[in-house]
Image: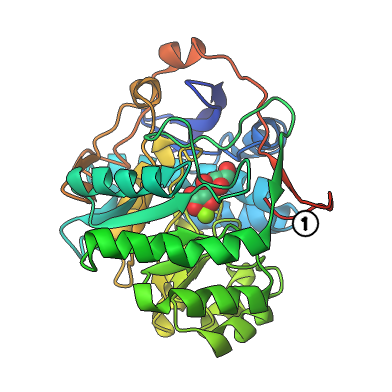
């Protein structure tokens, strides 16, 4: 089965998405998400200008060989742009292969290890009271796991708090907006937040929290220790993870489980974290980690060290990524949880899909392939719009981590 055509579709149904569509000589096509929030056009160009010319005429069934060709052949290995582009090719080729076999993709990945994929939703509020109410709303919607993010008293903005409570879109301006951060205000408020959530809703729901790279290792150890009484499912991205051994310091001070990895893009970014069991969940997902082929290798390494998956699933990852991720999630033995930030209705219309939500779980459905497609005519109605993620400064003006 030969690749005869491939194209990149950039569309903005409320936010920008980049999708690769590969066409074969047997009339089958496959799609893959290539969206990198704030750098979408870099990946679109990497695919159009550097990868697609090398794909035409290749055998679409040779997924691993094409992956190795694109990874080794780039010479300049790794990085979010390169690995998102490779991910899109890999996902589209798995989509094609499963359609060729007329099977949902999970059947080609070893079949189901579980009936459904437990997800977590995003309760957030501008202050403690609104956040408490939002947690209640997510419980009513049937979620068993809820991420809790709140505005911090004394700060005008912080990560994870959105105007629209159902759809969190962090890329909020056509040039980076500037947020102000105070670790002191955050560290003194956050334990109180979780104390109130547990006081009102008890302990049977899984609570998660995203620190979003903002603490030093010892501050993260302090936060983790201060949250132990509230039994979090995980504390996410407690400190920037380029220095993997920094997590040894956090581990010395707290048993609060740690999740890291949404900004990683190859197995080398997490190898030490997994092998030294410095984390409990690996957050990498299909679109930014080289696709299904590479993510499966990461999950296998993690399985050896009892590290579970907890894949990223923000609104800036398209339904094509979510669809592929659900087939991955349902087929691996060491699945932990799947993030599920809902997409807008207009996004769901551009990307018709077979996955569905019920009682706190997502189900991939049994459509052949990844169970997601793109409506090219509808996609044309939403032209690309420049949008950047914010930057973050401390109160004294020095740059920090957003
Ligand atoms: C966040 C993301 O979902 C998460 O855990 O870290 O919302 C992240 O901020 C965005 O994907 C960045 O584009
Ligand atoms: Mg995160």
> Secondary structure under badge 1?
loop
Relative to 36, 302 lies left or right = left
Viewer-proximal residue, 251 or 164? 164
- Asked if one can make out residue 170 in the rendered structure from this viewpoint, the answer is yes
Q: Where is residue 78, by image quadrant? A: bottom right
- Asked if one can make out residue 213 in the rendered structure from this viewpoint, the answer is no
Q: Where is residue 391, by image quadrant? A: top right
Considering the image in quadrants, where does the N terminus appear? Answer: top left
Relative to 225, 76 lies left or right = right
Position above or below: 64 against 179: below
Relative to 55, 78 lies left or right = right
Q: Position of residue 136 (x, y in %)?
A: 25, 47
Q: Position of residue 142 (x, y in %)?
A: 18, 48
Viewer-proximal residue, 326 or 247? 247
The residue depicted at 38 percent of the width and 46 percent of the height is 129
Position above or below: 197 against 242: above
Q: Position of residue 256 (x, y in %)?
A: 44, 77
Position above or below: 304 against 397: below
Viewer-proximal residue, 69 or 296? 296
The residue depicted at 21 percent of the width and 42 percent of the height is 357
The residue depicted at 32 percent of the width and 42 percent of the height is 370
For label 1, the residue is 75
Q: How is the image coloured?
A: rainbow
Alpha-carbon neighbours of circle 1 within 10 Å: few (<14), some, or many (≥20)? few
């Amino acid at each position: 089965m030969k690749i005869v055509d491939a194209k990149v579709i950039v569309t903005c149904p409320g936010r920008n998405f980049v999708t690769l569509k590969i066409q074969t000589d047997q009339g089958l096509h496959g799609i893959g998400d290539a969206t990198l929030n704030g750098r979408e056009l870099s990946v679109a160009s990497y695919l159009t200008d550097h990868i697609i010319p090398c794909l035409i005429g290749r055998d679409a069934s040779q997924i691993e060989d094409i992956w190795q060709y694109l990874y080794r052949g780039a010479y300049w290995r790794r990085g979010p742009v390169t690995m998102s582009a490779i991910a899109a090719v890999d996902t589209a080729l798995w989509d094609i292969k499963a359609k060729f076999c007329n099977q949902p993709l999970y059947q080609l990945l070893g079949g189901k290890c579980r009936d459904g994929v437990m997800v977590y939703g995003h309760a957030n509020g501008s202050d403690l009271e609104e956040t408490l109410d939002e947690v209640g709303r997510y419980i009513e919607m049937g979620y068993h796991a809820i991420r809790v993010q709140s505005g911090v008293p004394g700060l005008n903005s912080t990560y994870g708090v959105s105007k629209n409570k159902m759809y969190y879109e962090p890329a909020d301006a056509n040039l980076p907006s500037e947020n102000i951060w105070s670790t002191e205000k955050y560290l003194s408020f956050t334990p109180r937040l979780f104390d109130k959530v547990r006081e009102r809703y008890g302990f049977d729901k899984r609570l998660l929290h995203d620190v979003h790279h903002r603490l030093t290792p010892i501050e993260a150890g302090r936060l983790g220790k201060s949250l132990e009484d509230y039994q979090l499912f995980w504390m996410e991205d407690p400190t920037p993870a380029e220095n993997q051994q920094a997590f040894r310091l956090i581990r010395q001070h707290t048993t609060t489980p740690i999740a890291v990895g949404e900004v990683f893009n190859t197995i080398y970014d997490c190898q030490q974290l997994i092998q030294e069991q410095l984390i409990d969940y690996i957050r990498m997902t299909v679109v930014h980690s080289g696709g299904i082929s590479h993510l499966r290798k990461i999950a296998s390494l993690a399985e050896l060290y009892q590290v579970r998956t907890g894949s990223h699933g923000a609104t800036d990852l398209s339904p094509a990524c979510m669809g592929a991720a659900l087939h991955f999630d349902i087929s691996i033995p060491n699945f932990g949880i799947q993030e599920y930030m809902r997409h807008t209705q207009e996004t769901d219309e551009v990307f018709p899909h077979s996955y569905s939500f019920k009682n706190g779980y997502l189900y991939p459905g049994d459509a052949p392939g990844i169970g997601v497609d793109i409506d090219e005519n509808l996609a044309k109605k939403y032209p690309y719009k420049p949008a950047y993620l914010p930057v973050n400064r401390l109160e004294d003006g020095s740059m920090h981590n957003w």
